[in-house]
Every structure is written in structure tokens, then in C-alpha cells.
Amino acid sequence: MKRYFILYSLIFILFTGCQTQKNLTKSQLLYKRGLQHTKVTKINNNQTTTIINVTYLNPIKSRWDNKYYNFIIGIKTAKQNILDNTKLTLNQTKPKVIKSINTKDKIYKTIPLKNPWAKYYLVSFEKNDNLSLVLQYDKNNIF
């Protein structure tokens, strides 16, 4: 009798676990996709001076898959002028659009891995035929 109870319990747990995965809300699915396309890096000079979060938007939602490569870039640094002295390139091309994101903006609420002290930017680059994307920032020019 105990064997059947344990067997039925395990089957029940297995199916209910699978069932909750199917019932994710739209915002949870977007968050999950956003998290999969987010990278975090630190710039160190004997201590962490800058933390950068980058979320690639194109594969997350079809509205972002346009003629640009679109990113949300969050930067937390000890210095004030974040993008003023920074050379940011994608496959050695300069961005077409850099727009500051305010905490009241609608897109701010969708950012995965938010750092409340970071400043966020929507950065867009012209699409090209490259198969790989290399986002670079010139460390010598930062801050």
C-alpha cells in the first residue's frame, strides 16, 4: 500500500511541476527570455569600478527585431559621466541611437537583473551581415 502511495505521489508531483511551467504569464515569459539574453561584466582596477549589464532585445520580442540591433545597457560606476567619454561599438560600428531610460519609462519595468543604482540606456546599432555580434567598450576612454 505504501508503495502505491509513494508512486502516485511522485507521479502527481511530476505532472504538477510540468503544469506550472506551461502556465507562465506573458510578463514572466518575457522576463525569462530577457534573462537568457543578458550578460553582466565588471571592470576591475584592483577593485570593481564599473558594472555593466547588457540585454540584447532583438530575440526577446518581435517589436525589437527591426533594422537595428537593440540593446539595453545598464552602467553602474563610481564616476558621474557614464557615456560621455566612452567609446561603445558593435562589430566596430558606432551606435545610431543612444537614449537614456528613466525609471518611469515603460521599458524600465521589463529590464531583467535591474541594478537600482545603475543608469540605463537604449542603444541601437545598424544591422549588418555579420553572424556574430561583438559589443565593445574602450576601457581607456571610460570614465
Image (tube, helix red, strand yellow):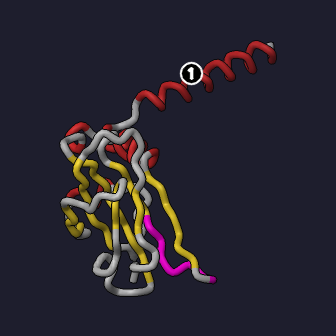
Q: Nearer the viewer, residue 137 or 77?
A: 137
Using a 10 Å C-alpha cutoff, classify the residue at mark 1 as few (fewer than 14 neighbours), some (14 to 19) or many (20 or more).
few
Residue 74 position, x and y percent, is: 37, 67
Residue 48 located within the stretch drawn in magenta: yes
Residue at position x 24%, y 67% in the image? 101
Name the outermost residue toward the bottom: 79
Residue 86: image quadrant is bottom left
Which residue is drawn at the image coordinates 63% and 83% (left, top)?
46
Q: Residue at x 43, y 62 (%)?
A: 53
Q: Residue furthest right?
A: 2
Quarter holding residue 121: bottom left
- The residue shown at (75%, 20%) is 6
* 106 with respect to 42 (left or right): left
Element under disc 1: helix
Quick one: 142 or 17, which is closer to the camera?
A: 142
Q: Nearer the viewer, residue 122 or 13?
A: 122
Q: Is residue 14 magenta?
A: no
Name the residue that disc number 1 marks.
Answer: 15
Residue type at mark 1: give it: Phe
**Image vertical order of residue 42 relative to residue 132, above or below:** below
- The x, y position of residue 32, in whole percent, is 42, 43
Give the vertical position of 82 relative to 70 (above or below). Answer: below
x and y percent of residue 122 in the render? 25, 61
Quadrant location of the N terminus? top right
Task: Judge by depth and name the residue closer to the eye, 98 or 17.
Answer: 98
